[in-house]
Image (cartoon, rainbow, N blue to C red):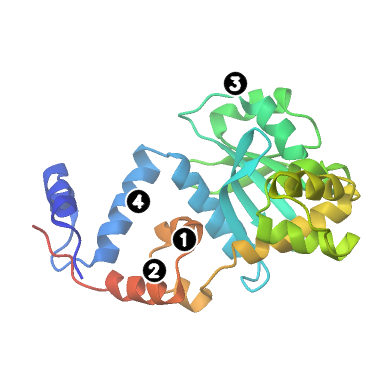
Amino acid sequence: MRLPPGMTALIDDSGLSDMLPKRATNRTLLETVYDLLQRHYRCEYVYKNTIAKKILVGRHRLADATMATELRCDSSKADFVILNGTSTVYEVKTELDNLDRLPSQIQAYRKMFDRVFVVAHDSFVEELEGVVDLDIGILSMTRRGALRQLRASGSHSGAVDSGCIFDSLRKSEYIPIVERHFGPLPLLPNTKHYSHCRGLFSSLPSAVAHREMVMALKQRFRLPVDRSFLERIPESLVAGLFGAQITTVQAETLAGFMDLEYAPS
């Protein structure tokens, strides 16, 4: 398996090929590109990958925890969510962003997640401390790519919005929950089925709705790989692979591809 011709041509034209050692592997290529991003263009992916490496992989058992990206939450999409025994959302603000939408995003996240963090570039820290409430956590990304916690997050699971949670679940997820708490559903026209289920789910206590959501989403975003696989891929790919929800077969194919010699055009 080789990279597509168009991609190798782009790599050659950009000058990346000249930065690679002789007999470089595909792993070497990806590590070189990611290093350039970290030093010169710390985009949102760099932040997400750092969270995936240092928090998801660094602090949790992968058998018990998983992650989701761009998850629907009210009128927003959550940048990065870790699901283990609870839920933690991370809103990323890079040096390329501004804070204009942050208040509305935090308001949305309070409706669905237990712990809420803003992960931002150092230049935003002072402004953030004056903008976000004291129960919202703050992490900063240092120049060396470390995450520094400036403020812990409070717990919001007892005050989430059950209706908001319902709107983020799939039909195959919310029906078992509703039936578990309210018994078998009556026969209803499709036009009334959704609203009937939403009404029942919305009556669940916040903490119960949150717990059910965590269990459902952990199944939806269950990771198909373990730590032994992570040792075979570049660290730069952790967030991308977990977010893509690749299959075990695809994971094995990719791991083998990493050790192949890079073949320029």
Q: In the rendered structure, which disc, 1 or 3, sits on the residue that comes first in sequence?
A: 3
- Write down the residue under mark 1: 238
Helix, strand, or loop for circle 1? helix
Instruction: Specify whether 145 is left or right of 167.
Output: left
Rendered location of residue 139, percent (x, y): 64, 41
Name the quadrant containing residue 52. Answer: bottom right
Q: In the rendered structure, which disc, 4 or 3, sits on the residue that comes first in sequence?
A: 4
Q: Label 4 to label 3, Cα distance in Å?
A: 28 Å
Rendered location of residue 221, percent (x, y): 59, 62
- Write down the residue under mark 2: 233
Residue toward you, 237 or 195: 195
Name the quadrant containing residue 191. Answer: top right
Residue toward you, 23 or 263: 263
- Write down the residue under mark 4: 34
- At a point 56% along the width and 68% down the height, the residue shown is 223
Q: In the rendered structure, which disc, 2 or 4, sits on the residue that comes first in sequence?
A: 4
- At a point 32% along the width and 58% down the height, the residue shown is 31
Q: In the rendered structure, which disc, 1 or 2, sits on the residue that comes first in sequence?
A: 2
| In this rendering, the label closer to the viewer, 4 or 3 | 3
Q: In the rendered structure, which disc, 1 or 4, sits on the residue that comes first in sequence?
A: 4
Rendered location of residue 41, percent (x, y): 37, 37
Q: Which mark is residue 100?
A: 3
Q: Label 1 to label 4, Cα distance in Å?
A: 12 Å
Compared to residue 143, the image places residue 217 above or below, namely below
- At a point 50% along the width and 45% down the height, the residue shown is 47
What amino acid type should be assigned to the residue bearing mark 2?
Answer: Ile
Few, some or many C-alpha atoms within 10 Å of disc 3 (few <14, some 14-19, many ≥20)? few
Q: Label 1 to label 2, Cα distance in Å?
A: 8 Å
